[in-house]
Image (cartoon, rainbow, N blue to C red):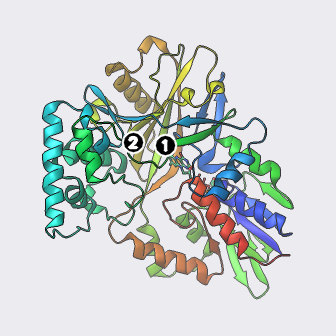
Amino acid sequence: MRIAVLGGGVTGLTAAWKLGRKGHDCVVFEGGDRPGGLCRSETIDGYVVDHAGGHIIFSTDREVLDFMLSVLGPGGAVKSERRARIFHHDRWVTYPFENGLGDLTPEHRYDCLKGYVEAWHARKTGAEEPRDFKAWCLWRFGEGICRHFMWPYNEKIWNVDLARLGTAWVRGRVPDAPVDDVLKAAAGIPTLGYGHQAVFWYPASGGFESVIRGILAALERTEVRCATRVETVRRDADGFTVNGERFDRVISTIPLPELVRTLGDVPESVASATAGLAFTSLTTVFIALADATVPDLSWVYFPHPDDGPQNRVTFISNYAPANAPAGGASVMAEVTHIGPCPGGTAKTARDVVGGLVHRGIIRAENVKFTKTFSNPYAYILYEDGVEGRIDAVRAFAASRGVDTVGRFGNYNYYNSDRCIRAAFDLAASYPDA
Ligand SMILES: Cc1cc2nc3c(=O)[nH]c(=O)nc-3n(C[C@H](O)[C@H](O)[C@H](O)COP(=O)(O)OP(=O)(O)OC[C@H]3O[C@@H](n4cnc5c(N)ncnc54)[C@H](O)[C@@H]3O)c2cc1C
């Protein structure tokens, strides 16, 4: 079969890789000037930066993890232990926050433990699980942890009133420490917490995009067309046309709202469901440092607005020696927005640098340069009721015969490993050529 794959991110390329090996001919339509989507990286003056903030290789799916590591070739990947912290006012707190209560001041520790025990008791005596995320946090963690971390951090990353969000996405995303861990942590007894991502990998050179380059090198029977936006997708008795060219099947990994625009004759109900698929965009602020003075950490969450607009900072030079020139170091900060990225990224960069300098995490005189990257789609905004809208749009794409897959391609909160799994499974459902 001749298959059009819309979008050349990790999902589209993996689908094309699998289908090529099955003997199908694929054409990947990629709107950007090179493939990779959210997994792109760049090397500037010897400093490696990932366009969409901190990316690591991790998966509980052995086949997927092996695939990601194998495409990197002999250069391979560097394995690291996760060393994540939360910057809380004047101190580093072990991540997840419930496992780090022992790092707080006695007053804050008391607030958090008191609220946690009250919430635990309320749940045990029948308090019903709330539907909105803000109330859910209170129900799950109690008032102290909400006030000190969960609410300010989530307000920073989602940029909306948390009561607008549902809870369908939290399982496996919001760490859920056992009560025993929380009690131990508050008493100062170390606990591991959130075994997920306790170790991770990062390409030894070339940034996270090396995964993409590895998949590209392994493609068979596939043409990747960059700077080629998909404008129209139509189905007829003989198959499909994409931008007027004939195909037997179409797989879409481009964001669902972009796909709907290409399909034509969109019913009013689908148009309105599509308009209700909210998302956040992301500005990545990269900071190249002249000397290697960053903390020996993987990444740090910044819940409080006083510390700058970033919700997270990755110390990317700690991921692989090749990520910064000898003696240098680097920092990558993530700033999210509702809807498209605003202009004025120079101000965002200044605010991030200002926040980190103010907190003594970097020194202003040590900054060699900053660079910003705008990512129009970063996180799905799980507003209450969004599942119904997602189902309606997916069903519309399916009614036009298009297979949808990927993070925004199918509107799933997927990391690249789960995108790869979904692409594997979709390709497996196609017959051999
Ligand atoms: C801040 C952040 C941190 C993350 N951290 C990690 C991590 O540590 N580990 C991990 O595994 N994953 C991580 N992820 C998730 C990971 O980036 C995504 O799951 C993955 O890259 C999604 O791949 P995709 O191919 O589905 O989509 P995308 O990468 O978005 O690819 C879609 C492609 O479609 C193209 N496109 C769009 N419209 C059109 C059009 N009309 N015509 C043609 N092409 C079009 C785009 O240019 C893009 O290349 C993170 C994501 C974010 C935002």
Where in the figure is residue 307, as x and y percent of width and height?
Answer: 31, 30
Label 1 Cα neighbours within 10 Å, binned few <14 / some 14-19 / many ≥20? some
* SS of the residue under disc 1: loop
Residue lying at the far top of the rendered structure: 365
Mark 1 C-beta closer than 8 Å to ligand 1: no
Task: Pick the quarter of the image with the N terminus.
Answer: bottom right
Residue 49 in the image, given as x and y percentages of width and height: 59, 33
Residue 192 has which mark?
Answer: 2
Pick whichever, 238 or 131, lies toward us: 131
Q: Is residue 353 above or below residue 193?
A: above
Q: Is residue 33 visible?
A: no
Instruction: Name which quarter of the figure residue 74 lies in.
Output: top right
Which comes before the other along the chain, label 1 or label 2?
Answer: 2
Residue 40 locus on image (x, y percent): 64, 43
* In this picture, residue 413 sits left or right of residue 432: left
Residue type for callout 1: Ala
Query: Viewer-proximal residue, 109 or 28?
Result: 109
Query: Where 314 sits versus 293, above or below?
Result: below
Q: Residue furthest bottom?
A: 237
Amino acid type of disc 2? Leu
The residue located at (75%, 60%) in the rendering is 28
Mark 1 vs mark 2, foreground winner is 2
Above or below: residue 292 compared with residue 249: above
Residue position marked by numbered label 1 in the rendering? 198
Q: Which quadrant is the C terminus positioned in?
A: bottom right
Q: What is the secondary structure assignment of the residue under circle 2?
A: loop
Coordinates of residue 160 in the picture (x, y in percent): 30, 53
- Left/right of residue 284 with respect to residue 387 in the rendered view: right
Which residue is pictured at 39% across the width and 62% down the height? 169
Q: Is mark 1 in CB contact (under 8 Å) with mark 2?
A: yes
**Residue occupying the point 45% across, 40% down:** 343
Q: Which residue is depicted at the point 66% across and 70% down?
A: 425
